[in-house]
Amino acid sequence: MRSVFLFSLLFSSLFATSLHLSDKQADFIAQKVWQNEGAGLDKYLVHWNEGEDFASVGIGHFIWFSKGHTERFREVFPMVLAFMEAKNVSMPAWLNSKTPLPWNSKEEFYAAKRAQS
């Protein structure tokens, strides 16, 4: 849970001045964000909404397209990854700012999620 909040702070640091919170304050805010953005459930961290042709990733619901896909919305997840790369954040070997969404359809996506359960 705390890592979700820390990721949000890391990303927001591009736009904010210095922020100092106690552990208790950080945990309180993290719980509120977690409840508001993901109903407190892990399954909403990587999600594919009804009527959409792309996945939404992370607490910020960052859009991530499969290879070759275009959409009227702006793909944001690769930009988040590029920011994290610039900050030397450790990520899985298969994931970088050039990695397309590994699934070509909502069906493939949910099949992979079920296989992980």
Image: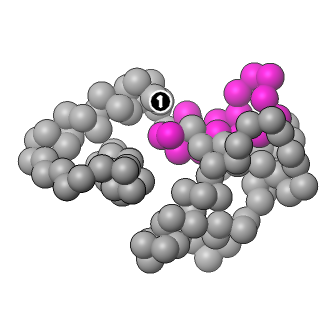
Q: Could you tell whether 69 is left or right of 26 in the image?
A: right
Identify the residue position indicated by label 1 in the image.
Answer: 38
Q: Is residue 107 above or below residue 81?
A: above
Region in magenta: 44-60
> Is residue 105 left or right of 41 when viewed as pictured?
right
- Can residue 52 be seen by looking at this rendering? yes
Please tell me which residue is depicted at 52% across the width and 72% down the height of the picture.
Answer: 85
Residue drawn at x 75%, y 22% as measured from the top left: 50
Q: Is residue 70 left or right of residue 94?
A: right
Q: For mark 1, give the secondary structure.
A: helix
Which of the 4 quarters of the picture holds residue 110? top right
As for residue 53 lying within the magenta part, the answer is yes
**Vertical relation: 62 (above or below) 93:** above
On the picture, is 38 further left or further right than 17?
A: right
Could you say which quadrant of the image residue 96 lies in? bottom right
* Residue 63 drawn in magenta: no
Identify the residue at horizontal 19%, vertical 43% (top origin).
26
Q: Pick the quarter of the image with the C terminus.
A: top right
Which image quarter is the N terminus in? Answer: top left
Residue situated in front as seen by the camera: 112 or 18: 18
Q: Amino acid at mark 1?
A: Gly
Residue 97's quadrant in the figure?
A: bottom right
Q: Position of residue 111 (x, y in %)?
A: 78, 42
Overall secondary structure of the magenta section? loop
